């Protein structure tokens, strides 16, 4: 599925700019800097397909990528919970994100990324609740596991497990990844393959 090259399709800034909903898609949501773009790069084996950067809030559009011989879209979402931008800009992203997560019929699964160092924050809880209300199945992916000790990783894992009990739309299986070290990437690829 990931053998064929993934290509960038377009960056969307408003719901009326969405590509036709003619195939299923999975999206990657999470706080700014959690590692969404890096994860897409790791999954597709392309170093700079989705831009990844040190500057939080870098991805400001909903970026669509065509993958698997055009069988599905991978969708890189703008990070949430990033306040260091003018309020109208932040509000515009938030509205777009909410409209997308609650109104995209072909969205098969949302991957909600949680930074292993930080765990679930209020804004993550809110996004998960929005997904519950929208009946979008979601699955948590822990990122940057290479940055912490196993004990810290397991502490976050337990915190996430507790959080997921509050969310009917959540899959119980949590995927631990490091885009840097390539950990968990194959697991995530096979999960996506089963959805296509
Ligand atoms: P926004 O687009 O701003 O919302 O950020 P993002 O979620 O797309 O994060 P991005 O992929 O740009 O990564 C943010 C920073 O974290 C970059 O400096 C990455 O190199 C770093 N990073 C991402 N994944 C990993 C990882 O698995 N391990 C380590 N050590 N660093 C990572
Ligand atoms: Mg990004």
Image (cartoon, grey):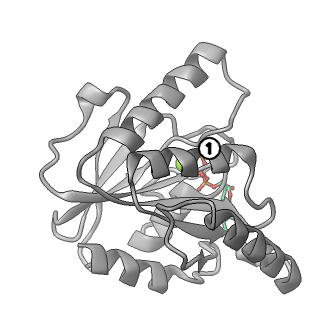
* Ligand 1 within 8 Å of the CB at mark 1: no
Q: Position of residue 18 (x, y in %)?
A: 25, 36
Q: Residues within 10 Å of mark 1 (few under 14, many from 20)?
A: few
Residue 173 to residue 33: above or below: below
Residue at position x 66%, y 55% from top? 34
Image quadrant where residue 49 sits: bottom left
Viewer-proximal residue among 27 and 11: 27
Residue at position x 23%, y 72% from top? 196
Q: Quick check: 192 left or right of 51?
A: left
Image quadrant where residue 19 sits: top left
Q: In which quadrant of the rendered image does the N terminus lie?
A: bottom left
Circle 1: element type: helix
Residue 2 can be seen, yes or no: no
Q: Quick check: 77 left or right of 135?
A: right
Viewer-proximal residue among 38 and 114: 114
Residue at position x 12%, y 51% from top? 22
Residue 8 to residue 114: above or below: above
Q: Quick check: 112 left or right of 195?
A: right
Residue 36 to residue 4: above or below: above
Q: Position of residue 160 (x, y in %)?
A: 70, 68
Residue 15 can be seen, yes or no: yes
Q: Position of residue 29 (x, y in %)?
A: 52, 52
Q: Position of residue 144 (x, y in %)?
A: 70, 69
Q: How many marks?
A: 1
Image quadrant where residue 82 sits: top right
Judging by the rendered image, the residue that carries numbered circle 1 is 126
Residue at position x 16%, y 69% from top? 69
């Amino acid at each position: 599925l990931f053998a064929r090259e993934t290509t960038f399709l377009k960056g969307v800034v408003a719901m009326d700019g969405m590509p036709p909903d003619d195939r299923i898609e999975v999206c990657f949501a999470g706080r700014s800097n959690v590692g969404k773009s890096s994860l897409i790069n790791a999954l597709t084996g392309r170093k700079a397909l989705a831009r990844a950067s040190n500057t939080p809030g870098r991805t400001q559009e909903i970026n669509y990528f065509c993958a698997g011989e055009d069988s599905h879209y991978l969708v890189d979402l703008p990070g949430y919970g990033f306040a260091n931008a003018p309020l109208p800009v932040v509000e515009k992203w938030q509205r777009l994100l909410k409209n997308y997560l609650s109104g995209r019929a072909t969205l098969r699964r949302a991957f909600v990324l949680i930074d292993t160092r930080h765990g679930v924050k209020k804004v993550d809880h809110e996004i998960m609740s929005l997904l519950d209300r929208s009946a979008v199945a979601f699955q948590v992916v822990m990122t940057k596991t290479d940055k912490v000790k196993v004990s810290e990783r397991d502490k976050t894992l337990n915190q996430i497990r507790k959080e997921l009990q509050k969310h009917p739309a959540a899959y119980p299986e949590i995927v631990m990844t490091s885009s840097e070290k390539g950990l968990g990437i194959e697991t995530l690829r096979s999960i996506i393959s089963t959805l296509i």
